[in-house]
Amino acid sequence: MSGTGPALIICTCGGALAGRLVFDRLAATPGFGPVMVTQDFCMPEGWRRAAVWCRQAGADVLVVAACGTPAATEALGRVATAAGLDAHRATVVDVREACAWVHPEPRWATAKGVRLIAAAAAGLTEAVRTPPPAEIIPSGRVLVVGPSRAGLAAAGRLRELGCQVVVLDPSRSDSSRASPAGDPTSPDSVPIPGRLLEVTGQAGDFTARVETAEGILDLRVGAVIVAVEPPAHVPPPDTSSLLTLLAMERWIATAGTTPSLHGKTVAFLLEDCPWPSATESALSLALSLVRQGGRSLIYYRDLGVAGRGLEERFREARHAGVTFIRMESDPPRIGERDGRWVVEVDVPGLGLFAETADVLVRGDAARPPDLGDLAEALRVDLRPDGRGPGERMPLEPVFTERPGVFWIGPSRSPCTVDQAIRHGEAAAMAALAAAAPGRRAVSVQAIVDTGRCALCLTCLRVCPHRAVTIGDGPAIEVLPAACQGCGVCAAACPAGAIQMVEAPGRRLLAELDALLSGPALDGDPIIMFACANSAVPAARTLGRLRHAYADRILLVSVPCLGRIEPEHCLRPLAAGARRVLLCGCYDRSCQHLVGPRRARMAAERAAVVAGALGLDGGAIQTASVAPVDWHRLAALLDAVAAVAEEGGAGDRAARGEAAGERAAEGSAAGERTVKVGTGKVAA
């Protein structure tokens, strides 16, 4: 048997989908050659039969209409391997959670399934064939910047695991003392005084340029761990002082005891510190001081006790004699009298309350050192307050936007000494994965057309993972170990010189064209571009819960909303879609950091062009959901369908007539043409 078109396998899920889908109509989807119907594709016997069938059919493109579970995806991978298929020319179409289980009427569920299957086949025919993997030989060495507790914990764990470590001390970079002689990676080596100038390359194969007293040193490393911390401030004994929690912690850790505080009063101000790490540190210090004969006062507005064991520590501190004072919203008034601090606060139910203290400990962490030069050398962004990378959930607490570069310790976020050490050990394990010696094959995520690339460097500026670099050739280069496949660079390239292996532009447009044609749905289609990291899992949860929504909503999965271009929004509107929804992560939750912002930019540009074409630019909408936000997604889909339902046929006819008039005027004037079908759209 030989196929004359894409091959189609339909799985009935053990007969569970019988009566919910019309399999004969699915099998008759236009454009397919051989068709196989099975009921156990996810089982070993089922995928083995499917692999034999694919080989006999001579299939080059394979679509499997089945469930949307990981088992189906894994079975597809096994079939592709056994049948010799290109992994990027085979896919699973979810007709269970996305059709049968969310659309009670078999007619509409089947019609939507036919469109999804046809779209998958059209996209696969335009898919980029899997390029050969790139080979990287990691150096087996890690650079640790900063001999702090966190940095030394990371270095120690890496050395225990057999990894070479170089520790750089930027705090002594201006010292005239020469760097120590010998191998800097040996376990007995001391930190090298020096300054990090630049880090080039990719995870596993970085080149770190370091300035030392002896000159410039180029180190080949597999990963970089930044563990600098604010300079220590140890107060003079027997005097009143103003400290931070971190400085107080260091003082006690260095001295072991605090004889100068025996019988003294120490006030801890936690008015702007709701995080559990500050609570843990303050409770530990207050208990230590009380047990040494001192007096501890803890002023708080919202005491964070959500961490492990903090509730018990809070009770222990109260029983030991630590005084807790809850403040109103007004900030405390701090003064000085007779060599002691005076703290006045408004206490609920009591009014103004004043206490004196010998030492005042502020809960806000010590101001980090100037990290601008270090961040520039590493090509990572700092927070607005000058601390290390963060502000985004996927990066916390050790990762940065650049794969292979890790940032830990109090210069990144407030943390106790114990937490800094744990972060150091976590960073060591992550760095080892990138720097471990041995050959490693890395999948190529992006392909650059050197003939189209104009070296405008737009991709270099927008890449959130610092994967784009300028090579020796006539075009930019995409570092395979750094590229995360988000597609932001491909969407931003004005020349269309970058093609993503997972979601090439031609494939997305082909899928859209197929989705917008086919069997009639219960209303004009609504296209939803769904982020694979957030909206897609939420939609699958809706399916598993069998929560019904309008069958006219057609989902297009993309690796990140940053992959969307204005043309992707305009194509559905020009073909008669009622709405276009871009649904992805929240700003601080995006795996690729900039996806929601880039999606909003694309939607705004598309709306401007839509207005010029006489289309409804207001029909383009962006929204955010989390992977577990199935209830929010359900409400969003219901609202979008309701808004689309309000528009009537007269509305559509009026817009179509206006679009025709504008197109005729533009053609007659011959001054400008906006292409919706092909090419880039510039606003």
Image (spheres, rainbow, N blue to C red):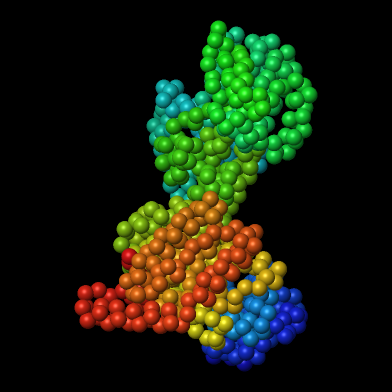
Find the residue positioned furthest to the top. Answer: 338
Name which residue lies at 60% across and 25% down.
346
**Residue visible at 59% across and 23% down?**
345
Q: Please, is residue 441 above or below residue 665 in the view?
A: above
**217 and 272: which is toward the camera:** 272
- Horizontal and vertical percent for residue 5? 54, 88
Quadrant assignment, res 540: bottom right
Q: Quadrant of residue 213?
A: top left
Identity of the residue furthest to the bottom in this view: 1
Residue 96, x across and y down, in percent: 67, 76
For the N terminus, the image quarter is bottom right
Foreground residue among 78 and 648: 648
At horizontal 52% and vertical 78% (from top left) the residue drawn is 525
**Does residue 157 sit above or below 97 in this rendering?**
above
Residue 399 visible here = yes
Closer-to-camera residue (38/641): 641
Q: Quadrant of the C terminus?
A: bottom left
Camera-nearest residue between 99 and 146: 99
User: To which quarter of the image does residue 376 belong?
Assistant: top left
